[in-house]
Image (cartoon, helix red, strand yellow):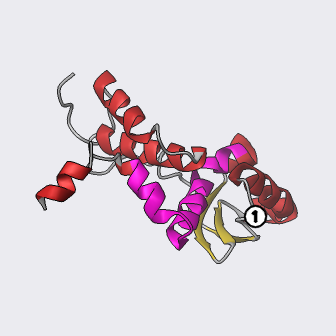
Amino acid sequence: MGDARSRMPRPRPVADLLTEALRGKPAERRLKEGRIWLLWDEAVGERIASLARPVGFRDGTLTVAVANAPWMQQLNFLKGGIVEKLNTLLGGPVVRDIYLKAGRTVSPVEAPPERRPPPRELTRAEREFVASETESVEDPELREIISHLMAKHLASKPTGEE
């Protein structure tokens, strides 16, 4: 065991290990699919985003909860354009179809936190840590996702040292 440590000059960033481990695997695709939720507002605009939210994704079909029947009918006509815009933002043909259903449209980000304290601003040291851990991830989409998740995790913890 001692020999293995001496061959490794310094610990590798988690982001590197994730990128390497997920490359070409179904999980890499799942990360790309997960970006749908991050890009939804940009893809559909503020007005539609306030009335329709993605709630599920399976086998190329995005399930979207829509606030009311008139908007469901309207979005039925816009589905093709929304699929096209999402795929452009995702950088490939991830979404094939959209299934509309009646449901709640409050974004999890907008929903009031139940038992968790509100996220806090990251300290400078934490921001630098996230940047240094993710700087070597070559894929910009994956780097953005990992940075976002790390920042979200750190922001949910009590403040460490400045």
Q: Is residue 20 above or below residue 97?
A: above
Q: Amino acid at mark 1?
A: Pro
Q: Position of residue 111 (x, y in %)?
A: 44, 49
In this view, the residue in front, 23 or 107, is 23
* Residue bearing mark 1: 93
Q: Residue at x 33, y 33 (%)?
A: 129
| Residue at the extreme left | 2
Q: Residue at x 62, y 56 (%)?
A: 36
Task: Identify the image quadrant of residue 101.
Answer: bottom right
Q: Position of residue 69 (x, y in %)?
A: 74, 66
Q: Position of residue 24 (x, y in %)?
A: 57, 68
The question of residue 16 being in magenta is answered with yes
Question: Can residue 121 be seen here?
Answer: no
Q: Residue at x 53, y 60 (%)?
A: 31
Task: Give the quarter of the figure containing the C terminus.
Answer: top left
In this view, the residue in front, 41 or 4, is 4
Task: Give the quarter of the figure containing the N terminus.
Answer: bottom left
Q: Which residues are magenta?
A: 15-42
Q: Secondary structure at mark 1?
A: loop
